[in-house]
Amino acid sequence: MKIYPQPTELFINEAVEEVDDGCERCGARRLARYRVVDYRGWLRVVKCRACLHTADAQRIESPVLSGEL
Ligand SMILES: [Zn+2]
């Protein structure tokens, strides 16, 4: 079973939602919420765009299996 389809585009266009909060590691106000996929499946994360600290991560249903992608 594929958890992510083979991209046909040159760049992946994932919507990134800015989060109005500061990073607890580096202090930058550059937190963003978006989806990622790892070897165990999909997550919705809040990560710092400056230092890549993960402020939050929750497992979500695969948007591939649900037909969203
Ligand atoms: Zn940071």
Image: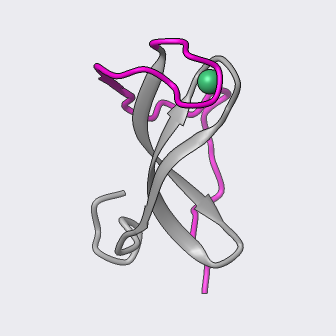
Residue 12 sits above or below residue 58 on the image:
above
Quick one: which residue is furthest to the bottom in this view? 1
Quarter assignment of residue 41: bottom right
Quarter assignment of residue 33: top left
Residue 11 lies in magenta, yes or no? yes
Quarter assignment of residue 12: top right
Q: Is residue 23 left or right of residue 7?
A: left
Residue 5 sits above or below residue 19 on the image:
below
What residue do we see at 64% from left, 20% from top? 26
Coloration mode: one colour
**Closer-to-camera residue (7/40):** 40
- Indicate which quadrant contains ligand 1: top right
Q: Position of residue 13 (x, y in %)?
A: 48, 30
What residue do we see at 67% from left, 32% from top? 52
Which quadrant, please, contains the N terminus? Answer: bottom right
Region rendered in magenta = 1-29
Residue 10 sits above or below residue 36 on the image:
above
Q: Is residue 31 left or right of residue 21?
A: right
Q: Position of residue 46 (x, y in %)?
A: 45, 41
Q: Main secondary structure of the magenta part?
A: loop
Which quadrant, please, contains the C terminus? Answer: bottom left
Residue 9 sits above or below residue 44 on the image:
above
**Closer-to-camera residue (61/33):** 33
Q: Is residue 50 left or right of residue 16?
A: right
Residue 67 lies in magenta, yes or no? no
**Closer-to-camera residue (62/51):** 51
